Image (cartoon, rainbow, N blue to C red):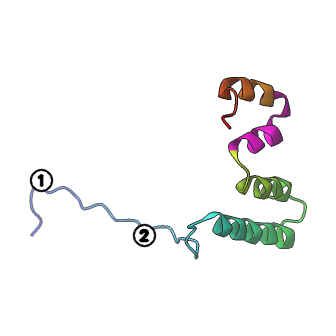
Amino acid sequence: DEQVGAAPVAAVAAPAPRASGEIANREDVLRQLDRLLEYYVRHEPSSPVPVLLKRAKTLVTADFAEIVRNLIPDGISQFETLRGPESE
């Protein structure tokens, strides 16, 4: 009793599991970064990823200018030129 010309129904893939704990603020971001660091220390101690995660942690609470100074020290003068004088 198949219908002639009926299109086959595609299988719907199950959604990928989500990580527990919604991230709602910077403190949550820092906690998640700590969890990632713990994973790498325990399971992949030779990975360079923890170095990058630790650096990312220092940037979470930084403002834009601090991030530029941290990531591109030679670029801060260009940034300050673009930004113009700070208002008091």
From the image, which quarter does the C terminus lie in? top right
- 46 and 73: which one is in front? 73
Residue 62 position, x and y percent, is: 73, 51
Residue in view at x 89 percent, y 65 percent: 45
Q: Secondary structure at mark 2?
A: loop
Residue in view at x 9 percent, y 70 percent: 1
Viewer-side label of 1, 2: 2
Report which residue position mark 1 lands on. Answer: 5
Report which residue position mark 2 lands on. Answer: 14
First to last magenta residue range: 64-75
Give the residue type that dot 2 points to: Ala
47 in the magenta segment:
no
Q: Are marks 1 and 2 in contact (CB under 8 Å)?
A: no
Residue 56, above or below 24: above
Residue 69 position, x and y percent, is: 81, 38
Residue 46 position, x and y percent, is: 90, 60
- 57 and 13: which one is in front? 57
Quadrant of residue 67 within the rendered picture: top right
Residue 43, above or below 63: below
Q: Secondary structure at mark 1?
A: loop
Mark 1 and mark 2: span between their CA atoms?
A: 28 Å
